[in-house]
Image (cartoon, rainbow, N blue to C red):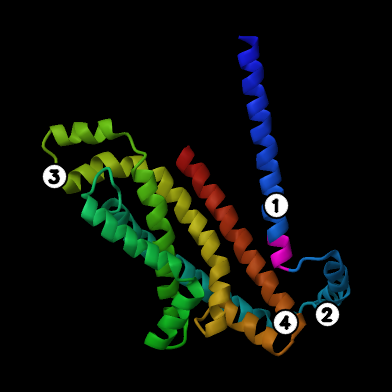
């Protein structure tokens, strides 16, 4: 018995050593591929410090313009996230293997995968071409970006629900809509709320990126100032964006507390 345990211990130790060696080899390969060297890091410190020095002091004269664009960003994020979540809930049900037929599951998951594969910036570019510059194209981009990610998170949550509750509702003759609303949706509410606020926080920062292609919000001014090397204005735009992120983070925290209570 002792010999068997010793042999098993030796095998585990050998596997651990092999795993460590393979991990180090993979990371060495990755670092070599990106041409990472300490010399490049050291050489980049002075330009970085110079850039940070030029950000100060922030140009507060543009605060009214940035606050107005921040309100527009909030509107974009709220509408885009709500629309994306509203679309993600029914699609996630159709993509769940434990409640939907296999052909529908495969088609819906493929659709969600395609939506999720396209970056938010590309979605914004598509909708800028389709509907023109401005916040509406940004809202549509955030909607599809949210739909892709929440659709996956929600169908994974549905596949982990307690099926005994579902079977109980089926046993009393409920139709598909009643099954979803009375047996599935109540179990999903915590997942829906948590992921909704996660996407809001995520979309605040993504809304800034969408300004690169003219999709409205504070990002439009951020990239405008970057292009003109107006670094004091960039600093002010970043401060306003930081205030947005902190504000939404505090809001989501308070809402979660209320829901828990």
Q: Where's residue 117, x and y in %?
A: 44, 67
Q: Earlier in the sequence, mark 4 or mark 3?
A: 3
Residue 217 located left or right of residue 104: right
Q: Tell me which segment is drawn in magenta.
A: 30-34
How busy is the neighbourhood of tag 2: few (under 14 within 10 Å), some, or many (20 plus)? some
Q: Disc 2 to disc 1, how far (Cα)?
A: 41 Å
Q: Residue at x 70, y 90 (%)?
A: 228
Residue lying farthest to the top in this orientation: 1
Marks 4 and 2, the one that precedes in the sequence: 2
Closest to the observer, 15 or 178: 15
Q: Which residue is mark 1?
A: 25
Q: Secondary structure at mark 4?
A: helix
Q: Is residue 147 magenta?
A: no
Residue bearing mark 3: 175
Find disc 2 in the rendering and name its residue: 54
Reply above or below: 32 against 198. Answer: below
Q: Say whether marks 1 and 4 touch (CB < 8 Å).
A: no
Q: Which mark is residue 233?
A: 4
Task: Please report whichever mark, 3 or 2, sits nearer to the chain's N-terminal start.
Answer: 2
Against 233, residue 108 (above or below) is above
Q: Mark 2 vs mark 1: which is more N-terminal?
A: 1
Q: Quadrant of residue 48?
A: bottom right
* Quarter of the figure with residue 41: bottom right
Q: Are marks 4 and 3 in contact (CB under 8 Å)?
A: no
Foreground mark, 3 or 1?
1
């Amino acid at each position: 018995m002792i010999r068997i345990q010793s042999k098993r211990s030796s095998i585990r130790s050998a596997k651990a050593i092999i795993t460590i060696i393979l991990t180090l080899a993979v990371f060495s390969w990755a670092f070599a591929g990106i041409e990472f060297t300490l010399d490049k890091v050291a050489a980049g410190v002075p330009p970085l410090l110079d850039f940070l020095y030029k950000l100060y002091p922030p140009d507060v004269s543009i605060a009214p313009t940035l606050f107005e664009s921040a309100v527009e960003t909030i509107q974009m994020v709220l509408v885009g996230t709500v629309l994306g979540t509203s679309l993600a809930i029914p699609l996630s049900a159709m993509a769940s293997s434990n409640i939907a037929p296999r052909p529908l599951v495969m088609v819906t998951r493929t659709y969600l995968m395609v939506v999720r594969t396209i970056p938010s910036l590309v979605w914004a570019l598509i909708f800028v071409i389709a509907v023109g510059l401005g916040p509406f194209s940004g809202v549509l981009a955030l909607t599809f970006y949210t739909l892709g990610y929440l659709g996956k998170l929600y169908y994974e949550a549905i596949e982990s629900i307690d099926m005994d509750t579902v079977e109980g509702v089926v046993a009393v003759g409920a139709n598909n809509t009643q099954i979803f609303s009375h047996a599935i949706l109540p179990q999903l509410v915590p997942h829906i709320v948590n992921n909704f606020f996660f996407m809001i926080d995520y979309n605040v920062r993504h809304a800034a990126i969408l300004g690169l292609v003219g999709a409205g919000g504070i990002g439009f001014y951020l990239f405008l100032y970057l292009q003109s090397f107006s670094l004091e204005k960039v600093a002010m735009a970043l401060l306003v964006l930081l205030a947005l992120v902190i504000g939404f983070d505090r809001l989501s925290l308070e809402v979660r507390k209320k829901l828990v209570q």
